[in-house]
Image (tube, rainbow, N blue to C red):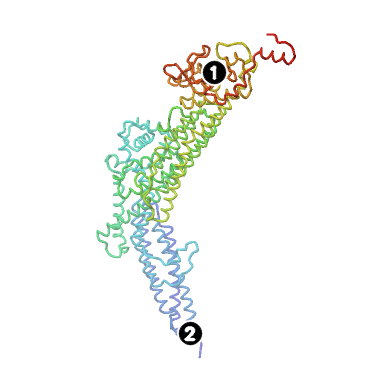
Amino acid sequence: MSFPKWLPKDLQGSYHLFYDMSRASLTFKWLTNRYLKEICFEIPDLHVVRELTNLTLCAFRKSDALQTHVTKAYVKKPGDKRIDRNPYYQLVAQKATIILGNLQQKQRQLIFIIRNQINLLLHAAQKQDSFIDDALSMVAVHNKCIEFTKNFDGAAQICSISYTTIFLPPTRIDVKDILQALTSHRSEHCCLQLISNLLVSCQVETGNESESDTSSIEVLKALTSHMSSGASPLCANDTQKAAAQDPTMEFFDKMVSIPQSAEESLKNDANIDHLEKMVSTEENYFAFILLKCLQFCPSIFETKPTQTEIVKYVNKATQTLWTQVGASLEHIVLWWHVAPLACEPVAAARHLRDWLLSMQYDEAPETLVSILRCLGETLTVHVACTTYDSQFRLALVASSLPIDYKFESDEFYNKKTVSEGTTTTGRLWSELLYTLTTFCNNCDQHSTIPNEIPIVEQIAVLHRLDHSIHTMRLWAAAKSKALCIEWGMEMFFKVVHNDINQCLEQIKVLRTPDLVSPDLFEVEIQVNVALRAKLISEVKVNICKLKLTSDECIEVLASICKMLSLATLSLCFPKSQFWQSDVLQENANEYVNHFLDEVYLKVVRSTNVLEILNLILRIMCEAWLDHIYTQKIKFSREGALNLLRDFEGVSQWIINCKYVLPEHVDILAKHEVLRTCEGVGKILLRKPFEIIPMSEKTGHSPRVPQKSDDPDGETLLPPEMFVPNQKRWLQLRARKRNQLNSIMCICAGQPCIT
């Protein structure tokens, strides 16, 4: 047997076939490079696209014929014993498999590049509609290429590690893929256009406002005049001056970008509903795209679509578009825009949020209602977080400054939070609580169903509100104690009465309605509802503690007042020898006025609350008596009468004080503690075993004027009856001089000389 008998008769034919397949692989590689280099995304060139698509179809037809021939002639099939018996055929089959793999690899690479270029052309179509024709022409070629590769979809070849999608079998591009690609590329444009149209829609509402005391209305007025092409030079100059003064206006000027076509439509139709027009514009755009698809690539439809099916496609595309707009609108507004809202003053976000919340959603298009509500909720969270950070920082800084420091900050100024007599720090805490309370009330004002309100956003606001009330209470308690130590009564009562009451006034409008039972909702909603209820209970507990803070501060005031009174008396109260003299004074001693001026006058000038005035007066007089008894001061008869004059000087000081209200003078001058002091003085005038009558006539002692609560002025309860433990005061009576001399003489054994 000779070797030539084993050689195939068509040896030259297989050689030419393999050569043609190698050339086809090079053709696909060449076409791939041309798609990458010659497709222009700045200027549409339909001629180049048609040339490339024709060459691509010719290459795939030729490749399909070559693959069919090689597969039938040289690729091993199951049960084919002809190749197993001949080593040469085994070698040829192995080579055919390798060449087929290389060819399929180049085909997949070309299909991948075509699909990638289609996506880029669809993205470029947002700037110029002519790119739609190029993209749809390439879609038709792409789908035909997929048809050629279906019969030869063998094992996956390693094409590129960087592009793993090439490993997957290529799929056809249908109408849903095109609409989805367009919606994803068009969503950012619609976000910007939606923001612009929202602000333009404010023109009708703010243009007729006669009173514009809020900066948001001023911003919108300046904004509409900025966008109006027919504005007068005077208006433009006023707008520029206002923008130079308010950074918020600069933000809105940067944020609004309306095309010339939109400006012309605003001039022609000033009263048109811009939101409705925007929705209809997008519907017309997708209808235009479907007509283009029918013209350039009808193969993307399974069957020829009817008018009803086209309407369904349009509705589905617009729904997908606005869904993507809603998902990315907040990010574009806050971060991705050329003038990101998050980088601007928080007032800008607050103006936009307030307008969205005040907007009547019944008048808005149905497709935009959820988007606008979601944007408002997102801006609520952003404004709440940034406002809280700014206001809480300001409040903490002001808390560390002196209480009377003029800390000017008008960024969060609100008339509802300003009250006469509040401190700067108290005003800042009041503004913070007002802001958080407003945010919290806005979350559940439309519904009480858990899945219909922004419960997650409200949880964040409630957490900050709880923390703010707790911190404000701690500040008020600490600051009031420090002011008591310094005896700064003016600022003390501003903190205890005005600041705390003003903060409680802001929290009083907090609404926390009970939500519908979440048992039928998802577990996540149930957890959020439980967390919301927990935070609400903690907020209420802190509110109750804040209400009790004023009483706690008054208790601290009482304890410090007693120590201050004792310290003042230790410095100004006369020595023991003064009270044992025989000199009888007509008026009260000077230390009485000094004592009252140092302690009581600051309280009287700072508050008109009768309970507090009575409390401080009682503490001062009790400290006065404690000082006398603690020092064991002995009183002669004249000294006791002088002490009575001093006690009467308190009533006279109250009557002459111009800061005491007329209706309080009589009450304070006849205070019960003054009767106690008078009783101590009279006890010092009595003998140890003298019986005190239970009633006495008025005017019994011409030296000591009587005070009577009886309207007729006939009888009154003796002042001694107001003194507890009367016996101890009898120990403070000084002995008479003749008695002292008799005792000394008896002790010496000499007769007494009287």
Label 2 residue SS? loop
**645 or 130: nearer the viewer:** 645
**293 or 644: nearer the viewer:** 644
**447 or 259: nearer the viewer:** 447
Q: Amino acid at mark 1?
A: Phe
Depth check, mark 1 against mark 2: the one in front is: 1
Rendered residue at 30%/58% (across/down)? 313
- The image quarter containing residue 82 is bottom left
> Vertically, is 666 above or below 327?
above
| Residue at the disc numbered 1 | 647
> Which quadrant: the C terminus?
top right
What percent of the width, then of the height, locates residue 687?
59, 18
**567 or 59: nearer the viewer:** 567
Rendered residue at 71%/15% (across/down)? 744
As measured in the structure, the alpha-carbon distance from the residue carrying label 1 to the one carrying label 2 is: 137 Å
| Residue 86 numbered mark, or none | 2
Question: Circle 1: is it few (<14), some (14-19), or many (20+) Cα within 10 Å?
Answer: many
What percent of the width, then of the height, locates residue 146?
38, 67
Label 1 residue SS? helix
Q: Amino acid at mark 2?
A: Asn
Is residue 641 toward the left or the right of residue 708 in the image?
right
> Which badge, 1 or 2, comes first in the chain's sequence?
2
- The image quarter containing residue 565 is top right
> Vertically, is 126 above or below 171?
above
Specify whether residue 602 is in view.
no
Question: Circle 2: is it few (<14), some (14-19), or many (20+) Cα within 10 Å?
Answer: few
Specify whether residue 556 is in view.
yes
| Residue 166 numbered mark, or none | none
Q: Residue furthest left?
A: 307
